[in-house]
Image (cartoon, grey):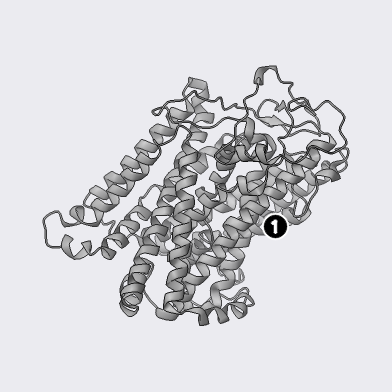
Amino acid sequence: MSEGTGDNPTDGGNVYASAEESRQYRGTSYMPTNYDNLDVAPDVEEYPDRGDGDGHRLLDLPRVPKLKYVLGPSAIMLGASLGSGETLFWPTLIAEHGWALYWAFFVGVLTQFVINTEIQRWTVATGESVFRAFERLSGFWPLLLLALGFISLGWPGWAATAARIGAIGLGMEDVSVTVPFAELVGWKLFGILLMVVIWLTYHLTPVMYNVVERIQIVLVVLGVLCAFGLFVALGSINELAKVPRAVGGVGTIPPNQEIAVFLGGLAYAGAGGYLNLAQSLWVREKGYGMGRYMGRVKNPVVGDDPEPIQRNGFTFPVNVTNLRRWRGWWRLVQLEHFLTFVFGLLFAATIMMAVASEYAAGTTTGGVTMWATEIAPQVGTVGRTLIFLTLFIALFTTEYAIVESFVRNSADIIYEQFGRTYGWSQARIFWLLLTVFSAWGILILALPIPVEQPFGLLVVAAAMSGVMMWPYTVLVLVVNVTRLPQHTQPGWPRIVGLWWASSFFGYFSVLLLGQTIERGTGSGWFRAAPAVLGSDPGGYLLFAVFAVIQAIAIVTTIRGKLRTKATVPDAEEAHGWLR
């Protein structure tokens, strides 16, 4: 069957790409189309619901490449996770409270697997970003996420933390206190250089995603190897014997646990918050599914012909070949994310928790301070070197991913909300945001303000990320179930998984909101008890709002799922495992 028609009868063959075609995905893969001459999908059940937008263009779903050639998007996500939950939040929580909290990390990772792959679903099916999907519901949602994204990621805390740990490891900390403008000469200057390096790397290739993927993969491999080397060198293997019992203690939360730290840990059992939404744009840049036709964001400074990123994406004609290709693509999406993100997180984070649990049990400090002042002095020269090297690589990798995700997400939102109307270039928006965001980080680091103890700020940012995950998980659920046709929408197990995910983050968001109001006003009227019963009146009100939102989401998705039942011929051809 010829690519781009979808008209020829097929017998279900021609589903998987050859090795030669698969190799086109090593960097990123883009296939130009004669967009204006393509047919527009009719507004019927077999195709995505247009919502507040125009119809999608009809084009065959690309053949499914081999897994090894599409690895990359989840590696960036893993890199975003290494310096947050996996080296700071979760080792601190386990060291302070023991392995009783490990169940929450395990559940958090699996929950994020469901959320992250569902974030990719609309993009693989249509080529459009998840923000464009939200915009088809209402233009309010992308703008809200943009604001929350800046609040949670706008402070250069990860760059500051990476610089601080690097400066301590290199012995710069002692030098800096003996000279004028001490901090700027010492670790702050180091942090500024890191921001400059990140900005410069984007100018190495015309397709900016390519350099991000390659650098992140190298940093992730180095970080994981250093973490494993530290684990082996310190002989913390006996701590792993406590893991099976810890997983079985589901629901156990130590008394007096700080909700902001716990919710931050749940959000950062992975990347968390605004970062996760970038998964949609990374798979589009890579060329997953219908994203292969959408174009890539290129660097306007390095120079190369721009590629058009259409406002309204694509959808594929319903025939046996395309349905089987969808099944192959969805299997590929899940395998890539599980083998890279989930397995990588569970491995790297668990061994770092083991080290922290053995050498800093009962700690009352947090993050970098725990590693630098409690663990490092106990482990000798080799162990100390590995600690600072592991932490520096992990934190720098996270800061790199934060810059990338914030800029890419925000550029997409601004372009779709305003840029197209005023004739702006998305590539130029991306480059300007990259420059402004990097300059903002440099300015904050250069000013004489207290960023030298950023862990408290990172707790606030992490908690904000956790709160943000509640509404956008609900949005992803509604979009994927009510706007996608039967053969590409999630099955019932995944729908239940998204109900669980939105309830999971919504419940802890209510606890955090109640605690924040109580501390801010000095009144306990909004106190929300973990058991719900026993809350004060305002706390019951918060739980009631949460319950209403969840009930609306559940009823809406049940109706959407039932409405599309038996509306697409041969839909079962698209249904594989964990669909």
Q: Is residue 463 visible?
A: no
Q: Residues within 10 Å of mark 1 (few under 14, many from 20)?
A: some
Query: Where 313 sits versus 283, above or below?
Result: above
Say which residue appears at 42% left-offset and 27% top-offset. 300
Say which residue appears at 37% left-offset and 44% top-offset. 198
**2 or 341, which is in the foreground?**
2
**93 or 563, which is in the foreground?**
93
Residue 435: x and y in percent read 35, 36
Say which residue appears at 47% left-offset and 56% top-offset. 220
Q: Is residue 187 left or right of residue 394?
A: left
Q: Residue furthest front?
A: 20
Q: How many marks?
A: 1
Residue at which label 1 appears: 497
Residue 447: x and y in percent read 23, 48
Residue 532: x and y in percent read 61, 68
Q: Is residue 131 visible?
A: yes
Say which residue appears at 49% left-offset and 51% top-offset. 217
Q: Amino acid at mark 1?
A: Gly
Query: Where 197 sits versus 58, above or below?
Result: below
Secondary structure of the residue carrying numbered label 1: helix
Residue 483: x and y in percent read 72, 38
- Image quadrant occupied by the N terminus: top right
Q: Is residue 385 left or right of residue 244?
A: left
Quarter holding residue 294? top right
Q: Is residue 277 left or right of residue 567?
A: left
Query: Where 135 sits versus 96, above or below?
Result: above
